[in-house]
Image (cartoon, rainbow, N blue to C red):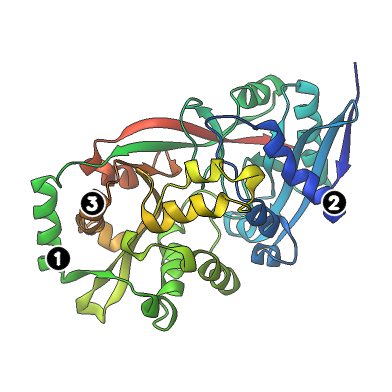
Amino acid sequence: MSLVEIKKVETKKDLKTFIEFHYDLYEGNEYDVPNLYSDELNTLSLDKNAAFDFCEAQYFIAYKDGKVAGRVAAIINNKANEKWNKKSVRFGWIDFIDDIDVSRALLKAVEDYGKQKGMNEMVGPLGFTDMDPEGMLTWGFDKLGTMPTIYNYPYYPEHIEKLGGFEKDNDYVEYFLPVPDAIPERYCKLAEMVMKRYNLRIRKLTKKDVYEGGYGRKLFALINDTYTDLYGFAELTEKQIDQYVKMYMPVANLDYITVIEDAGADNKLVGMGITIPSLSRALQKCHRGRLLPFGWWHVIRALKFNKTEGIDLLLMGVLPEYRAKGANALLFYDLIPRYQAAGIKWGESQVEMESNAGVQSQWGAFEPVNHKRRRCFRKSI
């Protein structure tokens, strides 16, 4: 039996090897949606990711018979641990060949790192923050992945079960949402009633609103208010918000972003829906996560020219006191006609806690189909 060797990522070359392994392991897979290499590099680099202001991490690569056989990131989010009164080390960016010795060695490396740092539990898959992909796919392996989520082979959760000591910490569900031919009449009536009764209004943003009017920052600030009680969430810092505005807003199609304001409260921002054309097929055409030589064209076609039939419901949030008023209905009252006009046939929700009935109830206009499930695991160490 060959021994598994675990090496720490210590150089830029090591980090490149760490990132490249996913492209090797999933080359030709019809369901995996690889991240852009540049995005992975920015997220994993100490000097580029604002989350390192409150996170610490160590990356590990597994070798067997002289070949790369797996990878994993050990992450401690000190801010989230303080908020939730935890001593957790997270494991993320976990990939491995179908070899139990490899997966065991990788997770043992995370466990040892956590113990050295005074942690008493290991949880994952999780990233630095909720803005990173989370949860291991446990059902829906024959479904196309999405840019914001993780795809993994069916043997991954099988290894977790065989290794022992792990238990369910949180389960997520994802929904396939066929775009209706017309907005249901009851949905229209609800949206119009909510606007009239509570003095709410739909607003479409311009580039000027985003940058000069501060709405780019307001959107991410609203995430802090609406996501605060979600599993493992830690509020985005001012530095992170600036980083995300710079990363995402320049390429956003503002037709697919809708905000809700309370006209009776100085146009207070109370809800938002950030949706983007599905980039799944476009990213699959970016060779090994590169935009050059031709990947950029496929991404631009999807983002700017609607050359896709899908939409990803990336970030949806309404302040708690406005959810009970039915304010969520305004988002799709505005967005569904835009999807129809662009030829969008389906949407896909991103990960949502299986217990979050409030979020799941807003998909009613789409006749939702739960087509994927994923899990975060926990182990005492």
Quadrant hosting residue 38: bottom right
Q: Amino acid at mark 2?
A: Lys
Rendered position, 357 above or below 246: above
- Residue 259's x, y, as percent? 30, 66
Mark 2 secondary-structure assignment: helix
Identify residue for label 3: 336
Crowd rating for badge 2 (residues with CA inside 10 Å; few <14, some 14–19, many 20+) = few
Q: Quadrant of the C terminus?
A: top right
Per the model, the C-alpha gap separating discs 3 and 1 is 17 Å
| Mark number, residue 154 | none
- Tell me whether the residue at label 3 lies in contact with that at label 1, contact meaning CB atoms closer than 8 angstroms: no
| Mark number, residue 195 | 1
Identify residue for label 2: 13
Relative depth, front residue between 248 and 214: 248
Q: How many marks?
A: 3
Upstream in sequence: badge 2 or badge 1: 2
Q: Amino acid at mark 1?
A: Met
Q: Nearer the viewer, mark 3 or mark 1?
A: 3
Upstream in sequence: badge 3 or badge 1: 1
Could you tell whether 90 is left or right of 211 in the image? right
Judge whether residue 318 can be spotted in this image.
no
